[in-house]
Image (tube, rainbow, N blue to C red):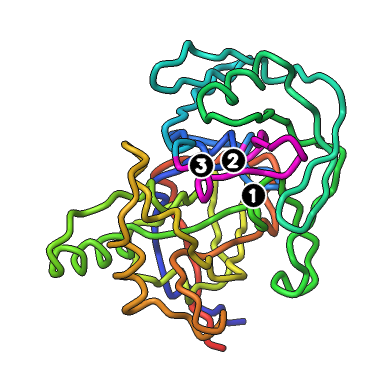
Amino acid sequence: MSTVPQDVSATIAALVVYPVKSCAGVPVHEAVLTDAGLDLDRAWMVVDADGNFVSQRELPRMALIRPQLKTFEIILRAPGMLALHLAIDAVEQPVRVRVWDDEVAAYDMGAVAAQWFTDFLGQPLRLVRFDPEHRRLSSLKWTGGVEAPNQFSDGFPVLVASEASLADLNARLAAAGHAAVDMARFRPNLVLGGVEAHDEDRLDVLRIATGTGIAELKPVKPCARCPIPNIDPATAASSPAVGDTLQGYRQDARLDGAVTFGMNAIVLQGDGQVLRVGQAVSAAFHFD
């Protein structure tokens, strides 16, 4: 019996966890994969007085909040603020909050955390933790009927991008007289090395041998881009260069002309497997 050869051999060039939705990411050398994405990714979220999530779209200074993950706590730092230490497994009262069109169960993180975010971002806010007993599923339309849980992400467990896609964008920015940008603008969880620009758009299941098993991620939906990539994560200042440049070559017919960069992926298998930077990734191209 013959086997179909893999079309692409890539590597994991970077892994990034975003513990608090819309705050800075934490680059990691390794991360535990769960059915809902990388462990602790988007496990916390900032909400307004009505329980609706807030993000850099309205509050660009969220980019300046830098989490650090320790064994038993998450530490949040921001300019001019004392560090906020929170126990990873401690929560307070249950609440209902809203992320996009989904109302989900969560836990409030208490008055100290609420005051910290309120003081730094300048409006009444609270920090909440996703309730792991709540099952929030990605759009079945895009997953092909596969039930793919996620926490407070915009809609899918894992975002995949590639080094080559960023290099291509930076070449276009340079040609237009703009400064290069880094991958932090696009907030991916998994960055592929060793592929061509935007190969991630055309790859089928990503297969990763972890040493103790197999992890499989399936890209299912192009990631439509809002204004967040225009925000410099180092300064929270915004300029239109990135969005304008992407508009010139990344209008995606699959999303009715929306500008896209990167692919949203679901976890087919590998709950509990450890992903590491440098691991090999194999995949075949798919053609619709």
Vertical placement of residue 54 versus 266, above or below: above
Indicate the position of residue 217 as horizontal and vertical percent values: 60, 59
* 20 sits to left or right of 244: right
Q: Amino acid at mark 2?
A: Lys
Residue on which the image places disc 2: 21
* 61 sits to left or right of 133: left
Mark 3 or mark 2, earlier in chain: 2
In front of the other: 226 or 8: 226
Indicate the position of residue 117 as horizontal and vertical percent values: 58, 25
Mark 2 or mark 1, earlier in chain: 2
Q: Quadrant of residue 267?
A: bottom right
Q: Quadrant of residue 230?
A: bottom left
Q: Secondary structure at mark 1?
A: loop
Residue on which the image places disc 3: 59
Q: Residue at x 51, y 37 (%)?
A: 23
The stretch in magenta equals 41-60
Counting labels gives: 3
Res 5 visible:
no
Residue on which the image places disc 1: 153
Q: CA distance from mark 1 to mark 3?
A: 17 Å
Q: Are the residues flagged by discs 2 and 1 in contact, CB closer than 8 Å?
A: yes
Quadrant including the C terminus: bottom right
Residue with the most extreme bottom position: 288
Indicate the position of residue 247 as horizontal and vertical percent values: 36, 75
Residue 285 lies in the magenta stretch: no
Quadrant including the N terminus: bottom right
